[in-house]
Structures are given as structure tokens and as C-alpha cells.
Amino acid sequence: MAHRWTPDLTHADVTPRAAFLNRRQIIAGLAGVGIAGGIGGRAMAASDALEPNDYGDITTYNNYYEFGTGKGDPAKNAHMLTTKPWSIKIDGLVDKPGDYSMEQIAEAMTMEERIYRFRCVEAWSMVVPWNGFELADLLDMAGVQSGAKFVAFETAMRPEEMPGLRYPVLDWPYVEGLRLDEARHPLTIMATGIYGKPIPNQNGAPIRLVVPWKYGFKSIKSIVRITLTDTQPPTSWNKANAGEYGFYSNVNPTVDHPRWSQASERRIGGGLFAARQDTLMFNGYDEVASLYDGMDLAKNY
Ligand SMILES: Nc1nc2c(c(=O)[nH]1)N[C@H]1C(S)=C(S)[C@@H](COP(=O)(O)O)O[C@H]1N2
Ligand SMILES: [Mo]
């Protein structure tokens, strides 16, 4: 794959420690990751703490409502999810619709590490070292047809394995969507690992979306279906409360949630008394700005 590049956070920037070398060796062994700088090279605001969160934070403080609405519920309950075998149905406006097994996908994709800021709409954030591949490569595998304009995603819905489905918090299954150009952006990945290990169930095993410039709820977990369509697909949080959650949901410190400010965020792991940090437009991923040229992002929140 020719278009590999390194986004703005790398272990070299953030983890000048022995642990960095160990992880890099693991990852290089897995994937043959290219480290050359690319379009993402960008100076970070001094206020932004770049240290990745530790594995414990990332895997015990979660939102995965199919397993309960408490932050600790997914870590307690998500072991009930059967993640093998797993396949993703890719359908709609594609040349090669069908059920793609995880093995088939893993074999065809180029795995790499991406260290991304992750900003929940609830105004907390983390830095996560994901392993995965670009969604664009998976879309190419299925062959996107010229009429496609959006990509719809769906999470597994298994009442016997997901105790949270008993509660009508959301209209299950959890669904999300992106415009096709957002889905094809090189920052948009499908994650199958964290810290070089298979992604834990509570984080969306065996495969979840990660869109780092959007609020965390766009990054849908445990995906079983991807549909290419010509119309904007429904999305779970927008269906639940359209006045609070829009389709785009780009991180935007100038557009507050109706019930709280989005100007700053609390970095998980910083401790109870750590200073909040400024939230960055597009979560700091300025390279996506041109996707929204001419759009009013206060209206298209
Ligand atoms: N299927 C599904 N996907 C989901 C959610 C969910 O409840 N169900 N929660 C979302 C929200 S609100 C956030 S912030 C992130 C949390 O990801 P993490 O637990 O890996 O940090 O997952 C998103 N994806
Ligand atoms: Mo979230």
C-alpha cells in the first residue's frame, strides 16, 4: 500500500522511554510500519498533553451502552460478547457485496499503529495507540460504486450477550454514518488493536471505527455491517436527540452542547485536580478542515 504516513502523534514524540522501544518492536514485527513523516506533521499546542493513556484507563473507562451505561459496565460485562467467528456484511452500492470474515480482512489490510487523541462529546478525552488499517482500503476491497455518497455502520445486536439491550436508552442496534469523503480520509481507521494487543471487547472487539476529529460516539464498535448508500444514513445519537447530536459531530470548541461547554476537556488519567485543557478544532486534526469548506459548522453540528 503506497499511501502510508504518520499522523501527528507518534511514540517518538510522546513516549521517550524504554516502553516505547518495546512497543515499536512489537508493532514493526506485526506490520512493518512506515515512520516517515507525511501530511500530518504539525506542531502541537503546548497545552496538549501528548502522553498516551495507559492500558488500564483505556480499557476500564468506556462507553459501550450495549453493556450498560456506567463507565465501568463494559469492562465488567463485555466478556459475554462472542467475537469469533466474526464477519462484516458489506452491501449497498458496492461491486462485491458479501460477508467478509475477519481473517479475510486482516489478511488483505496493511496493519499499522495510529496514536490519536480521542474526545468524547461528554468533554473527557484520552490519547489511544490504536492498531488497525485505513477504512478506505476496506472500501476499496468491496469496490465502491460511483453513486455512493455515504457509509452506514451497524453494531452487533445480541440480546443474549448484551445486557444493556434490555434498556431502551437507544434504538438498537447502534448505527452510525459518515459522508463518503470522511470515510475515505486517511485519518479514518478501523481499529482491531490497542497497544499492539487485540482490541478488548469493551473497546469494540473485534473491529471498530475510529474517526479522531469527531466526537467519540461516531466511532462505532463491534461492527457487523457496512452499507454504501446515496442517502444520509440515520445515526443512533441523532435519532435519540437531534437537538443535541448532529450527523457531523465534528469536535468544535466554539459550538457548545446545549447542556455543557465544549471549549475544554478533562484528560482521563490526569488525576482529579488536573487542569482541564483547551479543546482543539477538529480535535487538532486541521487537515480535515477542507472537507467542510463552505459549510456552516454551527448549523451542521
Ligand atoms: N456500539 C457502540 N459503539 C459506541 C458506543 C456505544 O455505546 N455503542 N459508545 C460511543 C461513545 S459515546 C464513545 S465516547 C466511544 C468510547 O470508546 P472507548 O470506550 O473505546 O473509549 O465509543 C463509541 N462507540
Ligand atoms: Mo462519547
Image (cartoon, grey):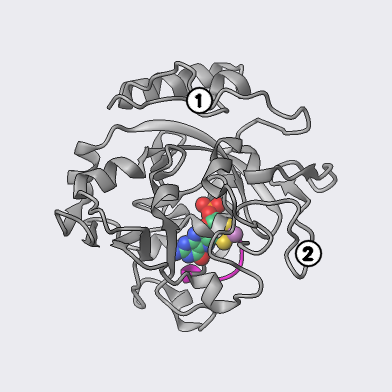
In the rendered image of this protein, does residue 112 appear above or below residue 226? above
Split into 4 quadrants, where in the image is the N terminus?
top left
Who comes first in sequence, dot 1 or dot 2? 1
From the top left corner, tell me how far across and down residue 130 is, in percent: 46, 38
Q: Which amino acid, by three-letter code, is at mark 1?
A: Ile
Magenta-colored stretch includes residue 167:
no
Front disc: 1 or 2: 1
Type of secondary structure dominating the magenta stretch? loop
Could you tell me which secondary element the residue under label 2 belongs to?
loop
Regarding residue 75, the answer to whether it shows in the image is no
From the top left corner, tell me how far across and down residue 209 is, in percent: 42, 51
Query: Which residue is under mark 1?
Result: 39
Residue lying at 24% horizontally and 40% vertically, measured from the top left: 106
Q: In this view, does 252 lie to the left or right of 81?
A: right
Residue lying at 77% horizontally and 70% vertically, measured from the top left: 259
Say which of 23 and 172 sits in front: 172
Q: Total marks drawn?
A: 2
Kindly report the distance in space between the C-alpha atoms of the residues bearing marks 1 and 2. Answer: 33 Å
Query: Which residue is under mark 2?
Result: 260
Q: Give the range drawn in magenta.
A: 66-71
Could you tell me which secondary element the residue under label 1 belongs to?
loop
Magenta-colored stretch includes residue 69:
yes
From the top left corner, tell me how far across and down residue 153 is, in percent: 37, 62
Other-residue count near label 1 (Cα within 10 Å), few / some / many at <14 / 14–19 / ≥20: few
